[in-house]
Structure formats: structure tokens, C-alpha cells
Amino acid sequence: MADTNTSGISAQSLKETLTKQLEAPYVEVEDMSGGCGQAFQAIIVSPQFEKKNMLARHRLVNSVLKAEIAAIHAWTPRCYTPEQWEQLQKGQA
């Protein structure tokens, strides 16, 4: 029963919605709930985050995923502009 997705939400469906709605060149969504679709964390890179503080970025993401977030227990987005993401990647190289 642990493998049953109880929310009807999947990492792939979240990724598709975020990529389309936020014109995001990079989205990575991970199901942290062992496949039951109740807890997700994400890395979202979008030019729409330019000139927005972290709270405004999270509000934008949450508005895009309003229905999905209502159906799950935990949602942890990490939001970056393309420039910030590029700098992060350079730092990890």
C-alpha cells in the first residue's frame, strides 16, 4: 500500500506544470514521500523570478500549483533565476 499515490499528484505532473507556467528552463521535482505523492521538494529555475525576493518567488510558484498544493502535505520549492542557478553550478563544479 505504501507505493500507492494517494494525492494523484506526481513529480512528473508538477514538473510539467511548473515548466509550462513559469517558462522554466530547468525544473527538478523529487517525491520525498516514498511514492505516495504527499511530500515533494523542487528546484525551479525561471526568468520570472528576476527582481523578486524569495517570498515573492514562493508565492508565484504556489499560485501556479494552488490545486496541487492543496492535495499534498509538504511542498518545498527552491527558486532561482537562471543567473543564480548558473552561479550555483559553477560553485559546485
Image (cartoon, rainbow, N blue to C red):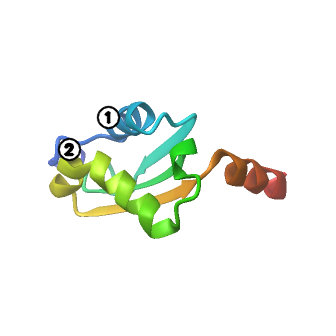
Q: Which residue in the protein does label 2 denote? A: 5
Q: Residues within 10 Å of mark 2 (few under 14, many from 20)?
A: some
Q: Is residue 24 visible in the rendered structure shown here?
A: yes
Instruction: Looking at the picture, tell me which residue is in the foreground, 59 or 6.
Output: 59
- Number of the front mark, 1 or 2: 1
Question: Which of pointers 1 and 2 lies earlier in the amino acid sequence?
Answer: 2
Q: In the shown orientation, is residue 1 left or right of residue 29? A: left
- Helix, strand or loop at mark 1: helix
Residue placed at 22% from the left, 48% from the top? 68
Is residue 63 positioned above or below 14 on the image? below
Using the image, tell me which numbered label, if any, was put on residue 36: none
Residue placed at 16% from the left, 53% from the top? 71
- Helix, strand or loop at mark 2: loop
Q: In the shown orientation, is residue 21 left or right of residue 5? A: right
Residue placed at 30% from the left, 46% from the top? 64
Q: Position of residue 67 (x, y in %)?
A: 17, 48
Q: Which residue in the protein does label 1 denote? A: 13
| C-alpha distance separating marks 1 and 2 | 13 Å
Name the amino acid, label 1: Ser
Q: Cβ–Cβ below 8 Å for labels 1 and 2?
A: no
Instruction: Looking at the picture, tell me which residue is in the foreground, 89 or 22.
Output: 22
Q: Where is residue 39 in the image (x, y as percent from the top left)?
A: 31, 58
Q: Is residue 2 visible in the rendered structure shown here?
A: no
Residue placed at 84% from the left, 51% from the top? 93
